[in-house]
Image: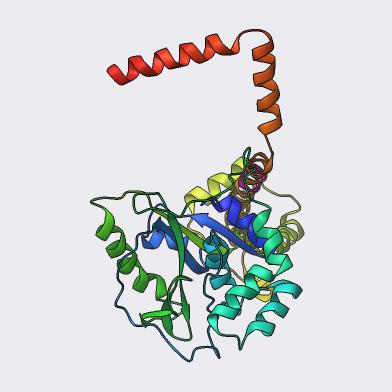
Amino acid sequence: IESDPGVFSELVAEMGVSDVQVHELYSLDKEAMASLAPVHGLIFLFRWRQEKDDRPTVTNYNDYLFFASQMITNACATQAILSILLNRPEIDLGEELTAFKAFTKDFPPDLKGLAISNSELLRRAHNSFARPEPFVAEERRSAKDDDDVYHFISYLPVDGKLYELDGLKAGPICLGDATNEDWLEVVRPLIMKRIEQYSSREIRFNLMAVTADRRERLLREQAVIEKERNMTVGKVQARSGKLPSASELERLAQQHPEPPAMGEVAVDERSLQELLIALAHLTARSNRIQGEISIEAQRVEQWRLENIRRRHNYVPFLVNFLKILAERNELMPLLENAKKKQRSQSRA
């Protein structure tokens, strides 16, 4: 599965999970993380190598931690996202995934991995992003040391500890104490150290954050603002009979600091001028959040279109196109020109 936030977000939705999104991270600083809060976990993609790892793994964790061994090839992306979804109780898993978690709770890691591979829900979601193969090889060779083999692992806090979950390991790796509030601070230097460890020979990494759906959070925030704004509009109209223009509200917001949010009783205690200033800032906040909602909607629509293209099988079109070129005696000249360009580029 491609390391893309749109792919992972749709993969999560097809598993029946709601109010979860995946975002690509370009920075691990506090500001970047704060803009995505709450962050349920991180997914790290790196070029895998057969290397010795002496870090001890945890045992006797079934009561509080879901960990599955990777039992089938190319399933690490699905297992990485499941490692986060099934270990964060605040996430709404949906009926099927909730039942799967309960059913496999006492399984050992290898049986959990087999259960993942045998789950119709998870297999269908995973295979929906399988790329069409124009040719099927009779034999598939094993990966060699110099092949580009990439692997996904997860980082997340569980029960006061920070864990690295990697289906190729014997068990979870505890990275130290961490709470839901400070775990991103704890994990930041660990990920940076891991990147620096390979930076001299490898630059292809990817880090994604599994978060609450930003659209839902913005809509909830917008609803709270609109409730207070409508209440303030009613008070202003009751006292003055008219509302300021958009330009007047913008000027008030620029000239006066934003007052704290007030309840219904407190609104009654404000003067008309205080109500107007509050209304100006509420309007500005509402417009800003509406803009952010529109950006998120455009992002999700772009993900949808890209995923349609990913899933589409272009092979029949390409085969027919090549046939038409051959029938017109245009294919071989194009091929010869391409070979000449390649030879000239190699000489240069």
Residue 346: x, y in percent? 31, 21
Residue 304: x, y in percent? 67, 45
Residue 320: x, y in percent? 70, 23
Residue 118: x, y in percent? 68, 70
| Residue located at (66% from left, 80% from top) | 101
| Residue located at (61% from left, 89% from top) | 106
| Residue located at (54% from left, 61% from top) | 73
Could you say which quadrant of the image residue 98 lies in?
bottom right
Q: Quadrant of the C terminus?
A: top left
| Residue located at (69% from left, 15% from top) | 324
Q: Is residue 151 above or below residue 330?
A: below
Residue at the far left: name it: 200
Left or right of 146 on screen, residue 167: right
Could you say which quadrant of the image residue 48 lies in?
bottom left
Residue at the far front: name it: 138
What secondary structure characterizes most of the magenta part? Answer: helix
Q: Is residue 301 magenta?
A: yes
Report the span colored magenta: 297-302
Question: In this view of the protein, which residue sits in the foreground, 171 or 90?
Answer: 171
Q: Is residue 203 above or below residue 193?
A: above
